[in-house]
Image (cartoon, grey):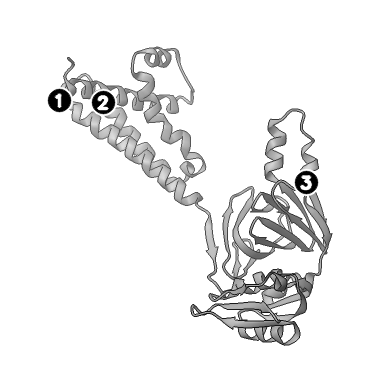
Amino acid sequence: MSDPGDILKIENVRLSEAAAWRVHLSEIEAETTAEFEAWLAEPGNKAAWAQVSRPWDYVGELANEPAMVAARQAALGYAKRASAQRKQPRNLSKFARAIAAVVVLGIGIIGAVWWHNQPDDYSTVLGERRVVTLADGSRVSLDSNSEVTVSYTKSARELHLLHGQARFDVAHDVERPFSVVAGDQKVIATGTAFNIDMSGKKVVVTLIQGHVVVLNENALAQTLTAPDAPSPRHHAVELQAGEQLAALPDKPPVVAPANIQRVTAWTQGQLMFDNEALATVVARVNRYTTEPIIIADPKVASMRISGVFNTGDVSGFVDIVTRYLPVTATETPSGQIELHAKG
């Protein structure tokens, strides 16, 4: 049976040699040589090469920063010096330290890349509104209980509306498209203003000004994997100012004219409704309160109402509803308000 200590020494030698080859190939700016291929063919060396090379294959753009380049060169230089002495058993501890330097640096660089590429996250709690100005001057207005992530690179501005509602006023930059993913819908723009409202599985995109393209990412993915599927352009919808796209999963999107004032009223702390079902209105009102209104009678849900209400003013809303509709309101022991049809 092999001695565990001998096995460890052999693995350390392989890793040290792999680090030295990593340095050598970088120095001569070559992907491979005949000598390297011969070394790689020896048992166990492919695994050692993969272990040493993997961090550098992952680093990408951040590796070009001066501090990272200097740290990487120092660690690899140390590994090279230790590898040059690999025939001396007393220096096996140097092999371990060299490999530790390489591996730890690799983990550190990967961690730095991960941290550097993490999107910024902005959110609001129930009843809160917030306006965020991004690095390029674009503004994101967040409605109550909403969350968006922002990731900017040299070639793209990518955002993700995780839940809630937001208005996006985009700074013009034709070389860096501005995109927002909401559910399975992706809105792409360069300089424009639009509103996205996520209510359950429904995504509503309203174009306030400018021009946007809305893609259904799930349908597009299926197109790319199915040779006989429709062209990708069939899954792209162009919106003009004043138009609204409403999308549900597994259904074609519906485009219709929009009332911009009503859609964006929330940015001024108001809710505007025009002959809408009370069930829909109550759902919107409940976005701004910790004590939601409950429609306890199916007859109430289909009643229709118009009006302008202040967000968070539940008592004022209930007062109007019970005054102008055949509805009564009762408060439960838990503090919730239930709506019932009169009679």
Amino acid carrying label 1: it is Arg
| Residue type beneath disc 3 | Ala
Q: Where is residue 72 in the image (x, y as percent from the top left)?
A: 38, 39
Distance of label 2 from label 1 (alpha carbons): 13 Å
Q: Name the residue under label 3.
A: 236
Q: Which of marks 2 and 3 is in front?
A: 3
Residue in the image at 43% along x and 27% along y = 27
Q: Nearer the viewer, residue 90 or 160?
A: 160
On-image quarter of the N terminus: top left
Mark in front: 1 vs 3:
3
Task: Answer whether residue 198 is visible to the viewer in this image.
Answer: yes
The x, y position of residue 10, in whole percent, is 24, 20
First reached walking from the N terminus: tag 2 or tag 3: 2
Q: In x, y percent, where is residue 202?
A: 68, 57
Q: Residue at left 71%, top 30%? A: 226
Q: Which residue lies under the disc numbered 2?
A: 12
**Residue 314 image-quadrant placement:** bottom right
User: What residue is disc 1 on?
Assistant: 90
Query: Which circle's residue, 2 or 1, is located before the other in the chain?
Result: 2
CA gap, disc 1 and disc 3: 67 Å
Q: Which mark is residue 140?
A: none
**Element assignment for label 3:** strand
